[in-house]
Every structure is written in C-alpha cells, then in structure tokens.
Image: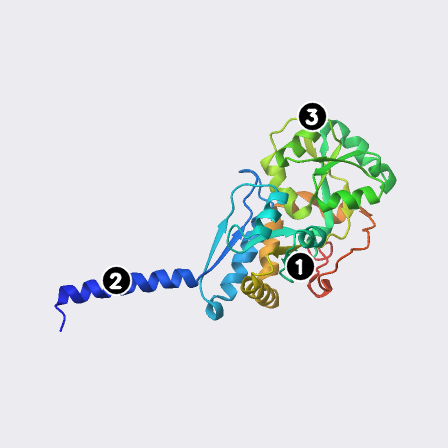
Amino acid sequence: MLPRRRFLQAAAVLLIAAAAEARTRELQLTLRAPDSAADLRNAYVRDAVQLALDKTRASDGGYRLRLSSVMNKRRALLEAAQQTVPNFLVMTGPEAGRAAGLVPVPFPLHLGVNRYRVCFVNAAMRDTVRQAATLEAVARLRHVQGRGWADVDILRANGFTVAEISTYEALFQMVALGRADLFCRNVLEVGEEARAHAGLPGLALDDSLLLAYDLPQYLYTHPANQAAIDRLSRGFRLAFADGSLQALLRRHLQPSLALLKLPQRRLLALNSPAPALVEMNDQPFQIDWLRHP
C-alpha cells in the first residue's frame, strides 16, 4: 500500500488533471466587447447567450463565456472569419454575416423588438421633429448612423439623407453639436443610452416619432463552430418555450419602455428592401411589442 502522504499527493495530481481535462471540454465562446463603458447595446445578447448555455448545461456540460478586445463590427466579422478566438459570435444582418463567410445561429434573438426605432434629436430641432407629420418630412431631416450599419441602406431606400460615422460615441456628439438632426435607435438600446448620455449638452430624446422597419439579425460565427451553433439554437428555443427568454428581454426593455410611451407616438412604417438572404421564418418568434409591452 502507498503511504498516506504519497496517496494524498497522487490523488491531488489526479484531481488537478481531471479539472484541467474538464476545462478543455468546456465550450468556450466569445462575444464582441462594448465600445465604451457607456455602451450597453449588447447586454441583452450577452445575457441571452448565457441563458441558452445554462438551459443546456445538463445535456451539454459547462461553458466559458468571454468578451473580445474592443473592436468595431467590421473587425469583429473579420476576426470571426479568421477564427482568431474560440467560437466568436457577432450579432449582425444576413448580408454582412454571409459576406464575411459566416453562418447564423438560427434563432431571431430580438423577438421582433428590433424593428422599432426612436430617435435622439438635437435639442434645437425638437419642435421641428414634432411637426414632421409625414415620412417625407422626417426623411428631409439630417440623419446619422454607424458606418456600414444595415439601417443605412433601409433609410436611404426610403429617401432619407444619412451620414455614416465610424465611432459609436461620435454619433451622439454629431447630434448634440447640431451637425445632424436625428440619430434613430433600436428601442431596446435607447433607454440605457439616454441614461448614459443624459449630461451631454444639446442632445435630447424625441418624444413624438416611432419608426418601424424590418431588420432581421442573428448571431453569426464560423461554419466550423457547429457545436456552439447547435447548442445555442437549442438553448434559445428551450428558453423561448418556457418563457424565460421573453422575460429576460422585457427586463432589458424596462429602461426604454419607462421613457418612450410607444403607443402614444406617431408610427411611421418604412419599406424594407426585399432581403437577398432569408435565414429562417422568424414569425413564430415575433412579439407585437406595441400591444404587449
């Protein structure tokens, strides 16, 4: 028999080896880091991914979820395509995702809420925007969006004048300084953004408009990451079936819903160009957020 001390040492080595082996078996996933401390755009996506992974922990095992270094979306798509980090997932539209050589996790994570937009406005233009009763009148105002964002093509297809800016924080500065009139945002994002930029002189939140247009988005990743794709797809569907995903989205929506009073706004529907790519039928997972906020 081994002396007790040698036995304990051998057992410790085995435990360390087993733990190391378990870590290597953990599914490692990477999400794009926020652009700044005030950037909470992807907080819901991060929490939803974690929810899906927790839903599948019993069947699929542990996981490690990390953030990338800070980078813009173009760089993130390139990093995902080059597989520089494990299972890099990027939220984007079908055209951008497929153009980068990536494939989707087939689930519409935003459940239809991302079709609605409200706008930050230059404070001096608030009354002008309130009086813009038609889509044509709103289109004549100066809009700003992120460079390469899918919104740009949709807005321009509807006659809007849109400037593209590369830096996220500069978008708010452009409106605050009066170099643009409106910066329209997904209603999921705008509540936290309004709070983060509350002290920026010249920036206000419009209280009259609600734009609507279809903008399907999914998490995209490298085609080799099939284990991650399958697990997340199953996890999202499990969370949707038991209502926990809807509850999570409503929690993230609360800062926006408390501000926006969506049913009281002037709804203007834009035409979305027919998509070149349709990843899936999103309809079974769409919620009417105006009727069921």
Q: Nearer the viewer, residue 126 or 241?
A: 241
User: Which mark is first along the chain, 2 or 3?
Assistant: 2
User: Which residue position is annotated with label 3?
Assistant: 177
Q: Nearer the viewer, mark 1 or mark 3?
A: 1
Secondary structure under tag 3 reads: loop
User: Which residue position is annotated with label 1?
Assistant: 108
Q: Pinpoint residue 181: horizontal percent, then vertical percent.
A: 76, 32
Residue most extreme to the front: 82
User: Which residue position is annotated with label 2?
Assistant: 13
Q: Residues within 10 Å of mark 2 (few under 14, many from 20)?
A: few
Q: Amino acid at mark 1?
A: Pro
Q: Is label 1 in contact with label 3 (beta carbons under 8 Å)?
A: no
Using the numbered discs, state the Cα–Cα distance from disc 3 to disc 2 in whole angstroms: 63 Å
Q: Amino acid at mark 2?
A: Val
Q: Pinpoint residue 237: horizontal percent, then vertical percent.
A: 61, 66
Q: Residues within 10 Å of mark 3 (few under 14, many from 20)?
A: some
Could one spot residue 156 in this view of the protein?
yes
